Amino acid sequence: MTAPGKIEPRFDEARGFTGLEEATKFVQDQAGRHDGLIQGMLAPDLVKTCAMALLVVIMDTARGLDVPVRLRIAQGEMERDTVAALHDTTAPKWLAGFGALSDQLIAPHATVATDTDLQRYVDHGVTMARIADDTQTETAPEHLQRRCAGPIWGGSRLEQWPISPFLILPMP
């Protein structure tokens, strides 16, 4: 918080790069364990808390390691508003502008993604992930129900939605 009721991000890029070095070493050390069953990924977490320079290096590192990157994108109004204030655009458009949208990206949520942003995911091969339980499958955002095609696994059943690829992971 920078003032009562006002939250704005503060970036510590050195800490981010240190974390990336640690994560990279961990991914390399664990890669292929148990007859290839163990593979890592990079997970910088929230797009609203990552600087462009760090995301560029994360994506380059992921390509070099041939691992996915999980980054929460378009997950809620606070993120949408923060990214708009910082970059004057949506998170998917901002990421596309410097090459961070790719088939290595796993983008959870997408609950406030616009139709244009969803098309960006498709155009760049982004995998969208939405964590749901059986009660949430039917309550996915309407624009996702309209736009998504391909297998969706929500809890105990396989369904077809009209954007591919799209993945729903069940809650434990």
Image: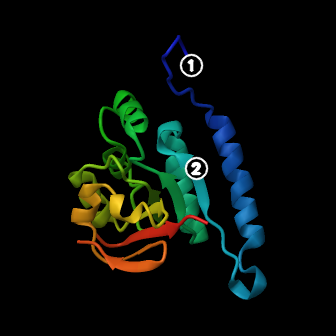
How much space separates mark 2 and mark 1, taking CA atoms?
21 Å
The label nearer to you, 2 versus 1, is: 1
Residue 171 point in image, percent of width and height: 56, 64
| Residue at image mark 1 | 1
Furthest-top residue in view? 3
Residue 11 point in image, percent of width and height: 57, 30
For residue 103, above or below residue 20: below
| The label number, if any, that marks residue 96 in the structure image | none
Residue type at tag 2 = Pro
Residue 59 in view of the camera: no
Left or right: residue 110 versus residue 23 is left
Q: Residue at x 31, y 55 (%)?
A: 141
How many numbered marks, from 0 up? Answer: 2
Left or right: residue 172 versus residue 22 is left
Residue 101 point in image, percent of width and height: 39, 57
Q: How crowded is mark 1: few (under 14 residues within 10 Å), some or many (20 or more)?
A: few
For residue 87, above or below residue 133: above
Residue 135 point in image, percent of width and height: 44, 62
Circle 1 SS class: loop
**Which residue is nearer to you in this view: 16 or 75?**
75
Q: Which residue is drawn at 24% across and 60% down?
A: 119
Residue 134 in view of the camera: yes
| The label number, if any, that marks residue 44 in the structure image | 2
**Which residue is nearer to you in this view: 48 or 77?**
77
Q: Which residue is drawn at 55% across and 44% down?
A: 54
Instruction: Please tell me which of labels 2 and 1 falls first in the chain.
Output: 1
Residue type at tag 1 = Met
